[in-house]
Amino acid sequence: MTLKGKRIAVLAEEMYQELELWYPTLRMREAGAEVKIIGTGSSPTYASKHGYPVTVDAAADQVSSADFDAVIIPGGYAPDRMRRYPAVLKLVREVFERGGVVAAICHAGWVPISAGILKGRRVTSFFAIKDDMVNAGATWVDEPVVRDGNLITSRTPADLPAFMREFLIALG
């Protein structure tokens, strides 16, 4: 499957989970998509949970939601930081509201919660944030990947193959 012409934002912040950022980034580039790493604006480079760096292409307040067909939100502890930035939440909410794909894995569910887009949706996540997702109005299930319209959620790095297969289908 080719994603030539598709534009994807992958969000980044300190303490991101390595596989959840790099696996989707490299997989989408391999499929021909234009992938941009978008940070919160707090730094030009962020370290993962294990110190692996990623350099951003732009900060969330420097881009428009119209620039992207999809947003991928990696987990780790980064989502707890990401959700503190109004520009990140605006980007996610606007992509979602215009029908673009929003994909969140592991703890990344915190960002769609803060963006206000989970009410009435069926979702999954790392089990530790189940209550947060339910309190945001979502129906939480323990499955490797859940797609509810243009929202895709997944649980852990072990679920990345299923997560990316569903993402490819959603963009295809």
Image (tube, grey):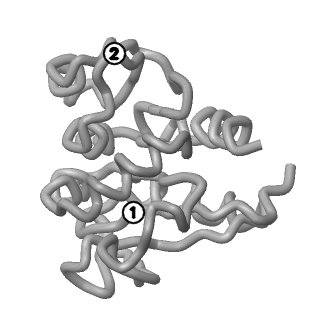
Nearer-N-terminus badge (1/2)? 1
Dot 1: element = strand
Q: Position of residue 95 (x, y in %)?
A: 46, 50
Q: Residue furthest bottom?
A: 44
Q: Position of residue 105 (x, y in %)?
A: 41, 41
Q: Which is more toward the observer, 60 or 167?
A: 60
Residue count near mark 2 (Cα–Cα under 10 Å), binned few <14, some 14–19, many ≥20: few
Q: Amino acid at mark 2?
A: Gly
Residue bearing the label numbered 2 = 120
The answer to whether the residues at label 1 and label 2 have Cβ atoms under 8 Å apart is: no
Does 103 sit left or right of 125 as displayed?
right
Residue pictured at 73% horizontal, 36% vertical: 169
Residue pictured at 60% horizontal, 55% vertical: 69
**In the displayed structure, would residue 106 be above or below residue 132?**
below
Residue pictured at 25% horizontal, 52% vertical: 79
Q: Position of residue 85 (x, y in %)?
A: 17, 62
- Disc marking residue 11: 1
Q: Amino acid at mark 1?
A: Leu
Residue 88 lies in quadrant: bottom left
Residue 86 lies in quadrant: bottom left
Q: Position of residue 72 (x, y in %)?
A: 48, 52
Dot 2: element = loop
The answer for how far apart the CA atoms under marks 1 and 2 are is: 24 Å
Is the C terminus in the top left, top right, bottom left or bottom right quadrant? top right
- Disc marking residue 124: none
Count of marks overlaid on the render: 2
Q: Is residue 75 visible from the viewing direction of this image?
A: yes
